[in-house]
Amino acid sequence: MSVENSGKAIIALFEPVQKNHNPAIQLRELIKRNLIAGVLLEDLRATLDAFDEFGFAEHFMTDYGDEENYRDPWSIFSEKDALQALATLRTCLTLAEKCFQFYHPQSA
């Protein structure tokens, strides 16, 4: 959820956030519409895959598990997965903070 919310925080700087669990879709649209400042563009493009990775499917698995195969979230994800997710979160959150500070420097 934190990765997702980091992406949605970036989107909210420009427009209302769509009701879905994959902010990468809307972030790509912001890029296409040239709304993202060039200084932030490279970081955002590098992070889009992370927003995709932690989109709807991952959100569903972490919350509910794999219902089809009767596996709870704790048997699907390992400590290594959790540590990787935490590293990804740090990247996404840092980007969201960077975007906020760029567009609202007086609030920083």
Image (cartoon, grey):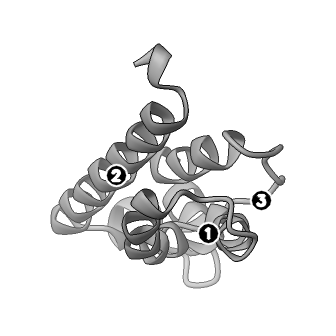
In the image, 39 versus 51, the foreground residue is: 39
> What separation in Å lies between label 3 and label 2 (alpha carbons)?
18 Å
| Label ID, residue 16 | none
Residue 72 seen in this snapshot: yes
State which quadrant residue 81 falls in: bottom left
What residue is rendered at 59% in x and 68% in y? 55
Q: Which is closer to the viewer, label 3 or label 1? A: 1
Q: Is residue 53 above or below residue 83?
A: below
Decide: few, some or many residues near mark 3? Use Cα within 10 Å; few <14, some 14-19, many ≥20: few
| Residue that badge 3 annotates | 20
> In the rendered view of the protein, which quadrant contains the C terminus?
top left
- Circle 2: residue type: Leu
- Circle 1: residue type: Ala
Query: Which x, y percent locates residue 46?
Result: 37, 74
| Residue that badge 2 annotates | 89
| Residue that badge 1 annotates | 24
* Of the image marks 1 and 2, the number of the one nearer the N terminus: 1
